[in-house]
Amino acid sequence: MNIIINQRDFLEGIQIVNRAVSNKSTLPILKGIYLETVKNRGLKLIGNNLEMGIEYYINAEIKEEGSIVLPAIELSNIIRELPSAAEISFVVDKDLYQVDISCLNSDFTLKGYQADEFPQLPDIEDALKIKLKALNFKKMIEEVKISTSTDQTQPTLTGGLMVLHEKNLSLVTTNTYRLAYSQMEIEENFEEEFKIILPGTTLNELHHLIENDIEKMDIFINNSYVRFNFRDIIFISRLIEGKFPNYRQVLPDNFKSIVKVDRIELLNAVKRVSLIARLDSNVISIKIDQDIMSIDSSSSEYGKAHEVIEVELEGPEQNIDIDANYIIDVLKVLDDEIVKLLMISPLNALTIKKQSDENYIYLIMPVRPGS
């Protein structure tokens, strides 16, 4: 392999595929990036940790074709420190499995691995295909990924349930203490409900990779994998096996009280009250009465905090105790100026919705006395 490549383009490509490079594997080659020249496409980069893989193409002047695997950390460090936007000469010695990197007055030799030993991304055959508006999907991910679980003993809860039904795509996440649900309209029509569970790491990486200039993305799904195609990126992820909880059972459809409140005002008030709450159990008490919301926290060792904000209340007065972080998380990701808090009783979940549409639901389970 012998190529000339732009430093900025090369670094961008390395940073993209590096998100799928393993940093824990006992196989050294999985800590590397696969590089291969492809006629009429340029330089192909692949990161693959066997659970998730990313393929990306970069424009390059190809003088001689070839392939190699190079350690990701060392390659990234070298390319990052080279002069920005300079031209890099990249020459591979296929017999020694190493590369000579030259740029202006800098020269490096980096040892790598035989390319044939690197696991290629799986082919997704007999795949179901859908098209999406990429930024709408990114916003959905942002709205639900806050509720994924980190408990590896319940693997299905560490991901998000994606449901295709009729002309709708839904994402659902829960850690049993809170639940987030978001829905968007799609072009395809699914008469029968189709479900898969996407890993939480996949949701996080997709959220990082989908940039604001990306309009469309294609999704391909089979029994084991899902593939996302957008811009020059191919992103493949293994699916989580298992059964996701029946989230519909916990979605309330009748409420006694509806509270409309300024999102930023509520967010800032909860943040201030949580300064005391987090010193103890992180629990805050919310009470709504006659268009006034009181937010309180206390600690026997450190003291107490109290905030009052104006709201619009429909229905009887309400009170509930909840985890402060759970409400802070959702208020930070929503965009609406006004949000709705829907309540039944102190022992039922607090439901939060947007004012602008009904396609988002967020539940917070109450903290019961003595728990």
Image (cartoon, helix red, strand yellow):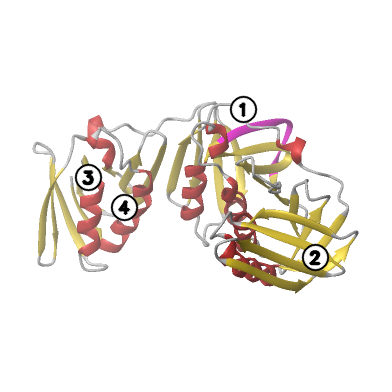
Q: Which of the two discs, 4 and 1, sits closer to the camera?
A: 1
Q: Earlier in the sequence, mark 4 or mark 3?
A: 4
Mark 3 neighbour density, 10 Å: few (under 14) some (14–19) many (20 or more) = some
Closer to us: 152 or 136? 152
Q: Quadrant of residue 149?
A: top right
* Local secondary structure at mark 2: strand
Rendered location of residue 223, percent (x, y)? 54, 26
Rendered location of residue 180, percent (x, y)? 66, 47
**Residue range corresponding to the magenta coloring:** 187-197
Closer to us: 81 or 105? 81
Does the image show residue 355?
no
Mark 1 neighbour density, 10 Å: few (under 14) some (14–19) many (20 or more) = few
- Tags 4 and 1 touching, CB below 8 Å: no
User: On the image, numbered disc 2 is attached to which residue?
Assistant: 260
State the CA–CA distance, disc 3 to disc 1. Answer: 37 Å
Q: Earlier in the sequence, mark 2 or mark 1?
A: 1
User: On the image, numbered disc 4 is attached to which residue?
Assistant: 14
User: On the image, numbered disc 1 is attached to which residue?
Assistant: 243
State the CA–CA distance, disc 4 to disc 3. Answer: 11 Å
User: On the image, numbered disc 3 is attached to which residue?
Assistant: 71
State the CA–CA distance, disc 2 to disc 4. Answer: 46 Å
Q: Is residue 125 left or right of residue 73?
A: right
State the CA–CA distance, disc 2 to disc 3. Answer: 53 Å
Closer to us: 72 or 243? 243
